Amino acid sequence: MNLEATRSSSSRSKSNTEIAIQTIKKLIIENELQPGSNHLESELAAKLGMSRTPVREATLILEAQGLLEIVPRHGVKILPLSISDMVEVYQVLTALEGTAAELAAQKSLDADAFVEAEKAILMMDEALETDDRETWAVADEKFHNELIRLADNSRIKSIVSVFNDQVRRARALTLYLRPSPTKSNEDHRRLLDAIKAGDAVAAKTIHTEHRVRAGAMLISILEKHKLILV
Amino acid sequence: MNLEATRSSSSRSKSNTEIAIQTIKKLIIENELQPGSNHLESELAAKLGMSRTPVREATLILEAQGLLEIVPRHGVKILPLSISDMVEVYQVLTALEGTAAELAAQKSLDADAFVEAEKAILMMDEALETDDRETWAVADEKFHNELIRLADNSRIKSIVSVFNDQVRRARALTLYLRPSPTKSNEDHRRLLDAIKAGDAVAAKTIHTEHRVRAGAMLISILEKHKLILV
DNA sequence: TGCAAAAATAACGTATGCTTTAATAAATGC
DNA sequence: GCATTTATTAAAGCATACGTTATTTTTGCA
């Protein structure tokens, strides 16, 4: 996980190392660099138009985040996400997001703190009606990000961010294979109500169960379709 | 967090980067490099007897793990752990160790899986009788490591490891200021029983409450003694 | 022809030097 | 004498070159 506190979007021009981290991550998420494939430092450096040094630094960070593995003399290996990896990642996400829901509920937040979360829920409802899954996925991610923001724990935020990067490929893959996420929308609405009501126990329970269910569904789809990201 | 899967103790000789990571971490944990202090790459390189390159790589990793911050032109800053940082870290540890307890209970493990955990509990009991807190702390850490091992989730393992590194200073500081950890021993015993009985709900509850209590105590001691690790 | 040993190659790990840029000091104007 | 601008310095960021070592290829011999 990058526990790196992504330097709050300052105007300072990005270093090559930062560009390399971001670009390589993007290439992995967009499946340009496929899971299981190997890439030499020098190749990546050529591809990114910079020297090996910043590329090497970037790969060290990304290895720490679990996106790839540095295998000396064979280049960096883009890590496949096996079913058991997905299970592990979802266990972590479930634990931390459940706690995030609990923490958010424990705070006494005023109504305007929830504006963005409510927008996300509305967007999901609308997307559901037209079965616009891309839009739904965007709104869903937005909602989860809002939840994390409300919890106000920077460590949880960065870990969750890193792990979401890892499962994004799988989510994209299953987006059109899963049943319509009606239940998800209900869960989100109930969660937000519980947080507003300050009911930390309910919030935690609702969101933990939501995550457990979502994870189980994702994994069963991957298994059924033999979608192993190798 | 270093989510780095510490390359399983292979016989291959360590690279300077690995040595630098390990050494700098050790210097921080042992308070040789004090929280809040700044250190130039070149100073650290000289101190470690290597060039700037591996030191720089190491500091990038350690920044990702949250132990320090790279401040251009001012060197790496050893991050102090404020009270609110401790709160954050304990929230993460509580969430993940609670899940670890749950996972361990869900597995059907045979008796010899618990040998080491039981040894640790015995060691804690003995240490309690003579109020040997150093030994108790070692055994306590051993018990927690065993719990994580039983849960068998490599991601949880590495995150917890990274965050434990961060709170180790605070634990050492409060070891002799806290009341005798009698309650902790009871908790551990009950937790292990629940795991053996396969009672995942109880295991999770017991350990979550244990962690919440331990965290609250640690923080109240830090506040009372104005022990802010700046 | 197949295998082993040696040579060649190539990739990494590290050191080093150059360039850019920020911080500090100096100098000049007001 | 103070503020503002310029010059100087020093540290980081990056490229590059070199030494080391794993891997591959070639060569010699059975």
Image (tube, coloured by chain):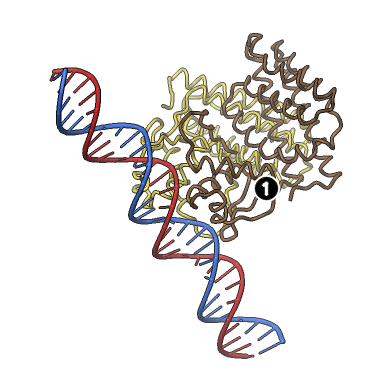
Chain colours: A yellow, B brown, C red, D blue
Frontmost residue, C30 versus B31: B31
Mark 1 sits on what residue? B32
Q: Residue furthest top?
A: B110
**Residue B143 picture quarter:** top right
What residue is at 73 percent from the left and 25 percent from the top?
A: B139
Residue B117 image point, x, y percent: 69, 18
* In-image side of B14 versus B198 (left or right): left
Instruction: Give the quadrant of the N terminus of chain B.
Output: top right
Look at 66% across and 9% down and name the residue there: B111
Point out residue A86 in the picture as x, y percentages from the top left corner.
52, 26
Instruction: Identify the residue at image location x=58%, y=24%.
Output: B153
> In the depicted view, which residue is nearer to us: A185 or B54?
B54
The quarter of the picture where residue B196 lies is top right
C23 is higher (above) or lower (below) than B125: below
Provide residue B49's location: percent of width, then percent of height: 52, 49
Q: Does residue B40 appear in the picture of this structure?
A: yes
